[in-house]
Image (cartoon, rainbow, N blue to C red):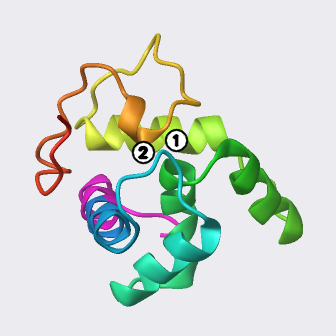
Amino acid sequence: MPACELRPEDKKKFISDVGQRLVKEHGKRKYYKPAEIRRAASDGGYQPDIVCWAYCMFSSPSDFTAIHEAAGEVCDYVAMKSEVLADLASGGSFLGIDIDLSWLEWPDIDLSDVFDWFDFS
């Protein structure tokens, strides 16, 4: 398995752990800065090569693009975020959802098993 690849169940745990750390450290935000996301992943003991999955979930689309352009990488924000969302929904469909929405703006998606630590109300 390539370095940045994660099994769906590992992706769920990773996104949940990083999200929990971000909210605890910085409060509930629409988007987080790349350095905040990197630190949350590092503090959780995660390797730097998988942080791109957290960037697509918790950073703005423009920050995501800037990170990858600076590294000389070509990564597709929409494709990665779609993959993560499908994995978080256990293979569910996200057709019709604006993929550029922040993680706080997702409509009627039951991700309570991923974000059970977060009160969406």
Horizontal side of residue 110 vs 52, given as left or right:
left
Q: Which residues are magenta?
A: 1-15
Residue 38, picture quadrant: bottom right
Residue 37 location in percent, x, y?
51, 70
In the image, is residue 66 above or below residue 71? Answer: above
Horizontal side of residue 64 vs 117, given as left or right:
right
Residue 69 location in percent, x, y?
86, 60
Between 104 and 1, the one lying in front of the other is 104
Count of picture labels: 2
Query: Residue, x 53% and y 73% (percent of image)?
Result: 36
Label pair 2/1, CB-CB below 8 angstroms: yes
> Visible in this render: residue 85?
yes
Query: Residue, x 50% and y 59% (percent of image)?
Result: 53
Can you tell which mark lies on residue 84? 2
The residue singled out by tag 1 in the image is 81
Considering every residue shown, the one lying at the far top of the view is 96
Query: Residue, x 49% and y 53% (percent of image)?
Result: 58
- Dot 2 falls on a residue whose secondary structure is helix
